Amino acid sequence: MDLNAVKNLTSKNYMNVFSRRNVCFVKGEGNVLTDINGKEYIDFVSGIGVNTLGYNHPKLTSAIINQAQTLIHSSNLFYNKEQAILSEKLLEGTIFNKLFLVNSGAEANECAFKLVRKYYKLKNTSKPTILTAIGSFHGRTLATLTATGQSSHYSQYAPLPEGFRHVPYGDFQALKESITDDVGAVMLECIQSRNNITVAEYDYLINAYAYCRSKGILFMLDEIQTGMGRTGKMYAFEHFGIQPDIITVAKGLGGGVPIGAVLARGSVAKAFNIGDHGSTLSGNQLACSAATAVVDELKNGLLLHAEQMGEYLKNKLAFFYKYKFVEEISGLGLLMGVRISDKINGNHVVSMLMNRGILVNVTKKNVIKLTPPLTITKEEIDKLIYELDLIFQNTNL
Ligand SMILES: Cc1ncc(COP(=O)(O)O)c(C=O)c1O
């Protein structure tokens, strides 16, 4: 089957929601993807921050193969050894006491919202509102798109669930004034990355956290993109020295196998009881074995590698400030953005890089977004910098 055949079948059968680039990948090895025509690309997208270990990583591949040959799924009607092992590994050494496994980021946030509501139900307190930030992204289910602080995501889907309000990101005073008696929790991202790549100001996050503490309400972080080593620490909140009550993770957890988690601490961690929540596929043996391989790798040196490669990438990218159309380089670890003048079409830069065998993403049309596998090497980063520099040299502005 060639690219045109794939495109024709897709447009005939698949609901038309994705704006896809003109390429179909059929294979991955290390940090390199191969398309249907045999062309290779060094990957700085990693399936949108998912393929933590790159492609065909021996530990992940063998964990999946072994588990597939043993038992893929038995449901949560029964005990599950792989789920028990992963849960212990995810929680050990953290501030969290309990978790629930899900299949995606949106599901993790849905579960977290239910957990908050159940927590206040048990306390006999009416605090139905969750504050989230303008510009945030929390998913595409009804509750999570309502929580998402971008009207383009929710404007067509009324009636929306109640109980969410948006406040400006980075503005502590506005947040403080919005925490009225009905507010039970605040959910933020340490890095907003749907538009620009915006790392929360240290003071903002610390103050938001401390104020929630002082008001006795829950502080939650959506770490779906920033968790699992993406920022050079296991979770991005560790950069800020705060202790959220709940975090949600997904994307990188399974290294490409769908799995997410809600991690909670203190009494909110114990709010769910039998029947309060569930999911048929969640935490099945296959997904848990894959995630365990990822977590093991992170703890066995990959986290340190990601931190070092993040520093290396940031230092190399700083070189581009020599171009006056490069307006901002931002991010943490291996979640970086290069914002260029909006007079340049970022999609054009992406296409030129793809012609040169480098895969990157673009947000908001002019922010080049880099989320490579955490296994990315110095040589691969050097290649990106070299090719991007050649493109920038020939950009007339
Ligand atoms: C911060 C954040 N939250 C939630 C989600 C939703 O995750 P999923 O697409 O797995 O439902 C995403 C996905 O991009 C995300 O980046």
Image: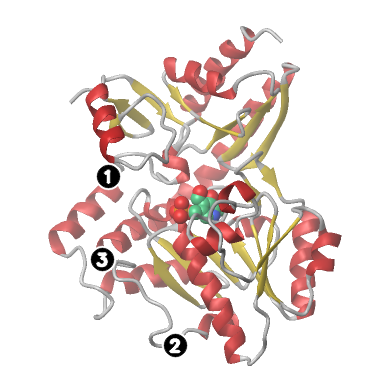
Whether residues under marks 1 and 3 lie with C-beta atoms below 8 angstroms apart, the answer is no
Return the mark for residue 285: 3
Q: Relative to 377, is 397 on the left or the right?
A: right
Q: Residues within 10 Å of mark 3 (few under 14, many from 20)?
A: many
Identify the residue at image location x=77%, y=53%. 170
Q: In the structure shown, which secondary structural element does the residue marked by tag 3 occupy? A: helix
Whether residues under marks 2 and 1 lie with C-beta atoms below 8 angstroms apart, the answer is no
Identify the residue at image location x=60%, y=46%. 152
Q: In the structure shown, which secondary structural element does the residue marked by tag 1 occupy? A: helix
Amino acid under disc 2: Asn
Q: Relative to 209, is 140 on the left or the right?
A: left
Q: Earlier in the sequence, mark 1 or mark 3?
A: 1
What x and y, as percent, mark residue 3?
26, 23
Considering depth in this image, is 126 or 307 the residue closer to the camera?
A: 126
Return the mark for residue 58: 1
Q: Which residue is mark 2?
A: 273
Q: Quadrant of the N terminus?
A: top left
Amino acid under disc 1: Pro
